[in-house]
Amino acid sequence: MKRAWQFALAALLCAALPAAAQNYPTKPVRIITSETAGINDVATRIIVQGLAAALGQAVIVENRGSAAITGTMAARAAPDGCTLLCYGSTLWLAPLMREKIGYDPIRDFAPITLAVASPGVLVVHPSVAATSAAELIALAKARPGVLNYGGGGPGSVPHLAMELFKAKAGINIVRIPYKGAAPAVNAVMANQVQAVVTTAGSVMSHMKSGRLRGLGVGSMKPSRLAPGLPTIAETGLPGYEFRSTWGIFAPSRNPAAVIARINQEAVRILAHAEVRQRMMDAGIETVGSTAQVLADTVRTEVNVLGALIKELGIRDD
C-alpha cells in the first residue's frame, strides 16, 4: 500500500511540472537536519520516503548537530537542488542570540514549504490552583515572583513561549533553567516548578495520566494534537500565539523551477492520509504550504520573538 501511493504521487507530479524541473535531479539528494530521534529527524525521514519515489533518486538524510552547524552547511552548499534543509525555528532564531554564526536565515535560504507544526501547550502541576490560563494569570498576579516555570535552555521553546506569555499577561513567574524540554517537564511533574509551555508531544501522555494539568494550547485554533484543550487566547490571554514550526529550505540561488517542483512534491506528500497519521503519532501536525507562507512565518517569528529576545537580553553563545 505504501509503495502504491508513492508511485502514484510520482506520476501525478511528473505530469504537472515543466520539463526543466522534470529533469531534476540527476544525482542523489541530501536533506540536512538535526541529530537523530528529534522532531526534525522524525519529520524529515517521513517526508523522505515519498520524496525519493517522486524524484526517482535516492534521498539521503544527513544528521548534524546544532542549528549553527546545520545552517552553515546548508548555506554553503551548491545551489543545484541536491542539498535541502529541514529544520525548526531555532534555525532563524539562533542568529538573534549569537554574535557570530555562519549564515543569514533570510538571505542564505530559499524557503520551500512550511512542513509541520506543533502548538505550545501550557501545563501545570495538578496542585496548582488554576484550571485555565486566566486563573494562572490571576494566581501569578496575586503572588508575583512565587510561581516558577521550567525554562529549558536559552531561546528554547519552553523559555520563549513562557516569556511571551508573561510579557503579554504582565506577570512575574520565575524561570528555572533546564538543559531541555524533557527535564523541564519532569520538574513540573515532580512539583519542583509549577508550569511549563512546550510541544504537545512532550506532555499529552502525562496529561492523560493525570500527572500534569493542561490549561490551553498556543495555536489560534484548537489542535488535534491536544484534543479537548481550548486555546490560551480564548481562555485568558487574547492574542497569544506560540507554536513550533519546521520548514524545508534550499540554499539561496537555486533555480525557481527546482524550488517549485520540490514544493509541489512535498506539499502532496504532506497531504497524504498515511503521512498525516504518522506525523500525528509523532506529536506534530502536517502543514504543507507555499514558499511564501514559510517566508512570512520566518519573518514574523524573527520580528516578534526577536523583539522579546532583545528585550530580555537572551544569549546562547
Image (spheres, grey):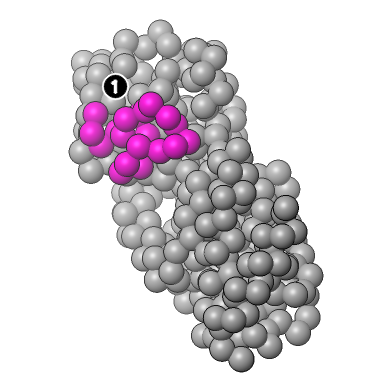
The residue positioned 51% from the left and 18% from the top of the image is 208
Say above or below: 162 vs 268: above
Residue 230 quadrant: top left
Q: What's the magenta region?
A: 216-235
Q: Label 1: which residue? A: 132
- Residue sitting nearer the eye, 210 or 268: 268
Vertical comparison of 236 with 113: above or below: above
Q: Is residue 237 left or right of residue 46?
A: left
**Residue located at (44% from left, 31% from top):** 226
Main SS, magenta residues: loop
Residue 234 part of the magenta-drawn span: yes
Residue type at tag 1: Ser
- Report x, y in % for residue 238: 20, 38
Q: Nearer the viewer, residue 118 or 47?
A: 47
Residue 107 in sight in this render: yes
Q: Viewer-proximal residue, 190 or 233?
A: 233
